[in-house]
Image: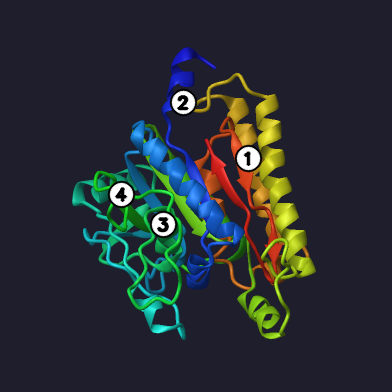
Amino acid sequence: MTVASANQTQSRAPVYFIAHGGPPTLFDTAHPAHKHWTRWGAEVQDQIKHDHIKGIVFVSAHWQAELGSSKNPHQVQINTDESNPLVYDYYNFPAHFYKLQFTSHNPRPFSDRVAHTLRTHGFDVEPTKRGLDHGVFIPLKAAFHNVLPPDSPHPKPVSSHDSGRDGLPSNIPLVQISLPSELIAGQAAAQASIDLGRALRSLRDQQIAIVLGGQPVHNLRSFMTTMRSGALPDPSTGLYRPEPFATAFSHALSEAILSSRSSSASSAGNDDDDDEQAAKLEKERDGKLLALLLRPEWKLAHPTDEHFLPLAVAVGASYPSDPVVEDTPVAEGGMAWNMYRFG
């Protein structure tokens, strides 16, 4: 690797895949996911302090492009609402769950820059006004000064970052973009999501972090069955007993992500951008991710695709030479909580 490319790598903003959980996890400060979110918030705040992060692009499992009958895999939507209102896209929770607030801003020049980057890399981008869904604001609230509604029965959680405002620092813009259309499914959807990540990743050299909110295993019906069965969480971990399919897929995911990094590290020394070896490693890494959809437990782990697809975006947004850190690689009921940092 040349000195110039080494310096570029050091200045790149990271990619984060976050298991976003749901509203109850926001109030469960003992849960391993909540603990990760607060650690992540402290890390991001430190990155912001040192000018390594100057903006955030967020992709959530809860926004797939709504494009009518279009099945264009390279077409997405981008939020242009500058106030980033919240979308309470969940049901049958206590009233205070619908009073959560999170302050962030999405200035038009920032969303225009992200849209331009996507178009430069072959994506059609449709501007639309939309709020941030819970795949975005739940982990962000835990990470940044989690103020709860006055009528919340929950104690005020320990915050990783107390800025005096419930939200991102005022100098950090945040824009959400959609996944490709839900009419695209299976390996085609995963490949389209990898392509989306690849179209976004040059933004990292402008100190714009790419954050993905999904779930490594997401069988909500199975998870709710476990909760309603009367089973109690393991007192040593705070987690419900995992289903075998959730454990198997969580382990397979770890192997796919971390073994790809191991093979990339063994071939280090070449530039990311134009080296044939890097392209070969990317193809190998993408193949390992796509192969997860062929596993026997795939449809149990993901009855629908959308919570897996942000992980595919994360892989696409990373480079073969990026160091990869895994956190919370644990399964719980019909869910799993693996989280990753690339770069």
Displayed quadrant of residue 70: bottom left
Which residue bears the numbered disc 1? 283
Nearer to us of marks 1 and 3 is 3
Q: Secondary structure at mark 1?
A: helix
Nearer to us of marks 4 and 1 is 4
Disc ID at residue 150: none
Residue 180 appears in the rendering = no
Q: Tell me which amino acid carries mark 1.
A: Lys
Whether residues under marks 4 and 1 lie with C-beta atoms below 8 angstroms apart, the answer is no
Question: Which residue is at the far top?
Answer: 3
Question: Which residue is at the far front?
Answer: 155
Whether residues under marks 3 and 2 lie with C-beta atoms below 8 angstroms apart, the answer is no
Q: Secondary structure at mark 3?
A: helix
In the rendered view, tell whether residue 18 sits above or below residue 148.
above
Q: Tell me which amino acid carries mark 2.
A: Gln
Q: How is the image coloured?
A: rainbow
Which residue bears the numbered disc 2? 10
Sequence-earlier tag: 4 or 1: 4
Disc ID at residue 140: 3
Which residue bears the numbered disc 4? 163
Displayed quadrant of residue 309: bottom right
Residue toward you, 284 or 92:
92
Residue 306 in picture, x, y percent from top left: 54, 66
Nearer to us of marks 3 and 2 is 3
Q: Tell me which amino acid carries mark 3.
A: Leu
Residue 177 appears in the rendering = yes
